[in-house]
Image: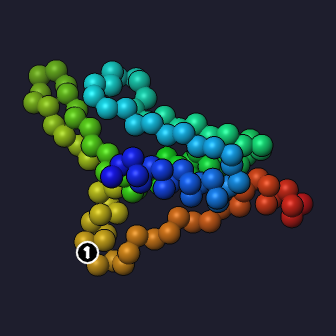
Amino acid sequence: MAEAKMREIAEDAARRFGIYGVAMEHRLGLVPVKESSIIIAVSSPHRQAALEGCAFCINELKAKVPVWKKEVYDGEDPRWKENKEWKEAREAAAAGHGVEPPAKKQKTAAEAEEKA
C-alpha cells in the first residue's frame, strides 16, 4: 500500500508543479538516530517548483501513508508509534468528517513567472 500511495503522490506532484521527476524512498529496518528515514528528490527546470514539489510530497506522504516507527530508548520498553498526521486524517475520516480532502493547489514557480 505504501509504495503505491507514494507513486500516486509523486505523479500528482509532477502534474501540479510541472516538475520532471520525483523519487521517494522510505527506509525500512533500523534507522540510526540523526539519519533520514524518508528521502525525497525532485528535479525541475525551476528551483521554486522543485522546492514546492518536495514540500508537497512530504506533507502528502505524512498525511496519506501509514508510516510507523518503533522507538527504542535506554531503560524503556520499545514502543510502536504511528505518524501523527496520518493518524489525524484517519480519525477525521472515521468520525465522518467527509472524505480525504484533495491537496491544496499551489502556484508553481512557472505559473508565478507567467503572471509577472
- Label 1 Cα crowd, 10 Å radius (few <14 / some 14-19 / many 20+): few
At x 19%, y 25%, the residue is 73
For mark 1, what is the residue? 95
| Above or below, 52 relative to 12 | above
Residue at 28 percent across and 25 percent down: it is: 30
Q: Residue at x 36, y 49 (%)?
A: 2
Find residue 55 and report its horizontal and vertical position in percent.
57, 47
Of 57 and 9, which appears nearest the observer?
9
**Quadrant of the rendered structure where residue 23 is?**
top right
Residue 65 or residue 98, whichever sits in front: 65
Residue 56, how many percent across, how many down? 56, 52
Side (left or right) of 88 relative to 25: left
Q: Amino acid at mark 1?
A: Ala
Looking at the rendered structure, the secondary structure element under dot 1 is: loop
Does 82 sit above or below residue 26? Answer: below
Image vertical order of residue 74 relative to residue 59, above or below: above
> Which residue is at 34% across, 77% downward?
97
Q: Is residue 56 left or right of residue 64?
A: right
Q: Is residue 44 above or below residue 4?
A: above
Quick one: quadrant of the C terminus?
bottom right
- Can see residue 84? no
Query: Would you say residue 110 is visible in this rendering?
Result: yes
